[in-house]
Image: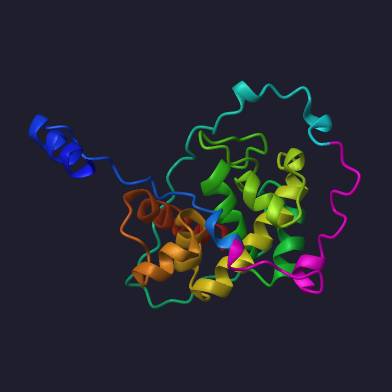
Amino acid sequence: MFLCIVLSAAALGLPAAAPAHPGHDQEAWWDEWRPSPEDETYADETGLDAGADEGSWFDDVEESGDELPAPPPPVAEPDPGSNAPPPASSGLRGVPYRSLILSYAKRRKLDAAFVAAIIRAESGFNPRARSPVGARGLMQLMPATARGMGATVGRLYDPRTSIAYGTLYLTHVRAVVGRSTRLIAAGYNAGPGAVKRHGGVPPYAETQAYVRRVAAFHAAYRRR
């Protein structure tokens, strides 16, 4: 019966189903990596949202109006042929949420300039950003991913909660794909499983463009 349906569709010239959109696949990894309460980085956030009344602090936010901000202005790509070492970060001068980024980057042993680059690429530093697929906040965490790490979904618009759990997720991606910032950025966008399957940055136009943008922002923030 199924074969007849397929042949009929082909005869009528019906298009084949398009492949699922690859971008921002955060949910599939959770069954592969579920931290224990003894996990040092996981334990850092125990009780972060304890007692929070989900959604109560941003009742004034009209969800239908939560949209991604306009893309930030382009940043010049770093010169790939240059042998000069990149300048050391001077502390993210002028970057929004600087103290939170520096604090959680240090806690997670992440490059603060790289965390800032991910935030800019994800939300343009808009804490109320919400994507069409439901990713929320500065670091655009999906609700299922946030729940799996112990976050209260209603707090994802809170900058501290978003950065705390977004950097925790980055440590998982790093554990799966390695320490290359290109691969970590690709894993954050398309999922670490996709990076492993393709042996590098997946051949998705969105992910490849995302990796380039993060690299450019990273280079710019390392100079601050």
Q: Residue at x 36, y 65 (%)?
A: 79
Residue 16 belongs to magenta span = no
**The N terminus: image quadrant:** top left
Residue 48, percent across and down?
Answer: 85, 53
Displayed quadrant of residue 130 = top right
| Location of residue 183 with respect to 148 vertically, above or below | below
Q: Residue at x 72, y 42 (%)?
A: 153
**Can residue 222 be seen in the rendering of this structure?**
yes
| Location of residue 224 with respect to 66 vertically, above or below | below
172 relative to 12 in the view: left or right = right
Q: Provide the residue span drawn in magenta.
A: 31-53
Which residue extends farthest front?
A: 1
199 relative to 43 in the view: left or right = left
Q: Residue at x 79, y 73 (%)?
A: 40
Residue 109, percent across and down?
Answer: 68, 72
Residue 188, percent across and down?
Answer: 52, 58
125 relative to 186 in the view: left or right = right
Please identify the dominant SS of the magenta region: loop
Q: Residue at x 48, y 76 (%)?
A: 85
Residue 23, percent across and down?
Answer: 43, 49
